Image (cartoon, rainbow, N blue to C red):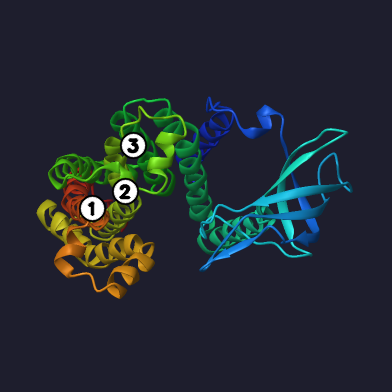
Amino acid sequence: MKNRDLTAVIEFILCCAALLFVPTGFKTNTDRGSKHARAKVLSVDDSDLQQFSIVLTGSQRLEVEVLSGEHKGEIFQAINQLQGRMEFDEIYETGDTILIEYRYKEDSTTTYTRGHYRIHLEIVLAVMFAAFLISVAGWTGTKALLSFIFAALMIWKLLIPAMLKGWNPYPISVFTVAALTASVSFLVGGLNKRGLATFAGSFSGLVFASVLAVVFTNLFSVDGAVRPFAESLLYAGFPELDLNAIFTCGIFIACSGAVMDLAMDISSAMHEIKHKRPDIHFTEHIISGMRVGRNVIGTMTTTLLLAYSGGYTTMLMYYMGQGTPLIEFFNLKLVSAEILNVLVGSFGLVAVAPFTAVVAGLLFKTDKPKPQME
């Protein structure tokens, strides 16, 4: 383990620690007096439920036993209020373990359900992933895990609060992407020329994608209301938000991971080539990097398509089942937005190959062949 790698790891650990204590500026329900706890359903009263076609409305009345927190062991009466929307509603049965939110009063405690309890499973899965990553990739996996944590904290502690406060989404998104790119490039690639080539190549591709996103979002006449919860966000007390700008920034943020992946592949390959062939000509070195990039691009563009379209499988099934003509289907605002997302992201992905190859070629050009020992 090189000292420079250790220095980078320590610096990013300190950044993650600092981000943990950065206030978002938005209060949670716990700040307003409510508490959350794990609870077991003891009995269920479904008499208020009503069936309309395939949708249930009304409410369930539950008797639950608190399993955690300061009121552990107490019995509360909880309400499961249904919205008539299958993506949000959950139906509980006796014996289920759920999350409840309540405001405790000695004479009356108001308790609401907040879904099946999944936190423990999420923690187990996260620990399994971390252990698996480190066992397979070793020290590199540890650095990758650190960059993963840093990315999550940057998005939750800086990007999302800044957008909610009405900051201009473009500079804050570019800053966030630059920080995330730096974390992956210098933690995984190292504080060296390979890491610098990865950062410069991937960030150049992302800047190119961001310009295309701004231009074609306007040309497509697509607005940010196509994103889930966009309209709800306006009604929730944030009517001044620029949904179009948020949508545009989401395009190049979404493709940043694939772009960094490709840049790392090319810079690592060119680093290895230079190490094995220190006398390789500058032009030949760049061409070799481009060849590596071409092979990876062929799979990564398809990866982007599958990643984006996978979340819209039911939408595709719906419109096909309705017999919607293709010309009408592709002209839909929602579909056009996803096409824009995929193609602009793919543009950035393709552009990163020559950018990274040229930058890596220039950086590695100054490396001198090591003298041979007689």
Relative placement, left or right, of 212 versus 95 is left
User: Residue at the spot x=28%, y=61% of the render?
Assistant: 276
Query: Which badge, 2 or 1, is on the more N-terminal residue?
Result: 2
**Kind of element beneath mark 3:** helix
Q: Quadrant of the C terminus?
A: bottom left
Relative placement, left or right, of 33 versus 50 is right
Q: Position of residue 108 (x, y in %)?
A: 83, 36
**Kind of element beneath mark 2:** helix
Say what amino acid the circle numbered 2 marks. Answer: Val
Q: Position of residue 136 (x, y in %)?
A: 53, 64
Q: Callout 3: few (<14), some (14-19), or many (20+) C-alpha neighbours within 10 Å?
A: some
Q: Position of residue 361 (x, y in %)?
A: 18, 48
Q: Which residue is mark 2?
A: 226
Outermost residue toward the left in this view: 283
Residue 333's tag is 1
Residue 178's tag is 3
